[in-house]
Image: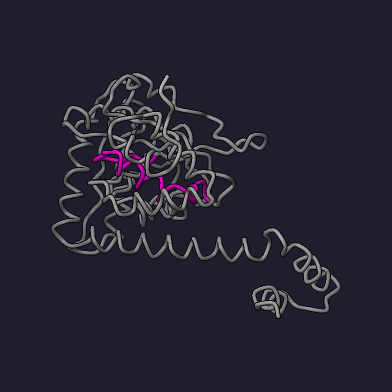
Amino acid sequence: MPKRPADPAALVRAAQGGDKAALGRLLSLVERGGTRAREVGRLTFAAGQADHVIGITGAPGAGKSTLTDCLIAAARDSGRQVGVLAIDPTSPYSGGAILGDRIRMQRHALDEGVFVRSMATRGHLGGLALAAPEAIRVLAAAGADVVLVETVGVGQVEVEIAGAADTTVVVVNPGWGDAVQAAKAGLLEIADVFAVNKSDRPGATETRRDLESMLDMSTPAGDWRPPIVMTTASTGNGTDELWTTLAEHRSHLVRTGEMAHRRERQLLDELRGVMVSRIEQNVLGAGAGARYEEVAAALVRRELDPYDAASRLLEPED
């Protein structure tokens, strides 16, 4: 049995040659972090970007996984290579993704043009793993034209996925709740496309009407107005229209220059995230724990306020 490549450069070459095992190992390195992950990041950053990164978010139970499965099929019918990241809740015991590779997507398991990977949130706020931007680049370097990022859809996840994707699909169901609650969730601000899934159920027409009313009040004149696509992913109804709408949004982004602007913003957001992570590691990492405990004790004794305590921890040691 031939020895599998171990160093990042060899793994990248193997993944670009179609080796799914190598691709899986690269994603594992990215998730774990550390020196080898940084090398993977350098190699894949220089390899180019995916043609279209699509985020799929919404409340649990909205049918996101089934809808993602339908979009994989539509992309493959269009001759596209597809990578899927399913951002799952983190197991409190293993730290791994609880749901594993999504059962509903397994009909594509033998398709060489599809790669599905579950990633744990690692406790990161909103459910989007810090490693997700690098994982997207790994998939692109391995040949994925289209990357679908499906999230668990809780907390601030909608905002986070909007920051990592070119196009964000917000999936809602009939009986989704009143317009005020939707506005609080920030759906109007981050949705590029709405999918009213399970639209064969009662209340679908009312849900679409509520969304249209909210968009009438909020969408600036001349701007992209998020289309509302009625889908029933369990039967495939409406999913071809959704795929076409996603392609139209990408064309809009390219035509207006918004694609380049969004990707620049994503990189700057990622830079800030990396900086915050590095600062946290410097303050709480190996060798820094004693200093943290000392400052924390002074804070608890009310000898320092939180801002002074933070300043002490961020100042370089003599």
Front-most of 194 and 127?
127
Q: Is residue 30 above or below residue 284?
A: above
Where's residue 39, x and y in %?
43, 51
- Residue at 29% x, 27% y: name it: 70
Whether residue 144 appears in magenta in the rendering, the answer is: yes
Residue 80, by quadrant, is top left
- Residue at 79% x, 72% y: name it: 299
Most distant residue in the left direction: 255
Front-most of 150 and 209?
150
Work out which quarter of the rendered image holds the N terminus and state it.
Answer: top left
Query: Is 304 left or right of 114, judged from the image as shown?
Result: right
Work out which quarter of the rendered image holds the C terminus and state it.
Answer: bottom right
- Residue at 61% x, 38% y: name it: 95
In magenta, the rendered stretch is 126-149
Q: Is residue 276 above or below residue 71?
A: below
Where's residue 314, x and y in %?
64, 74
Q: Is residue 27 above or below residue 47?
A: above
Query: Is 36 left or right of 15, judged from the image as shown?
Result: right
Front-most of 317 and 274?
317
Q: How is the image coloured?
A: one colour
Residue 5, by quadrant, is top left
Query: Is 81 left or right of 296, judged from the image as shown?
Result: left
Residue 207, by quadrant, is top left
Where's residue 241, x and y in %?
19, 34
Most distant residue in the front direction: 2
| Number of residue marks | 0
Where's residue 260, x and y in %?
23, 61
Whether residue 50 appears in magenta in the rendering, the answer is: no
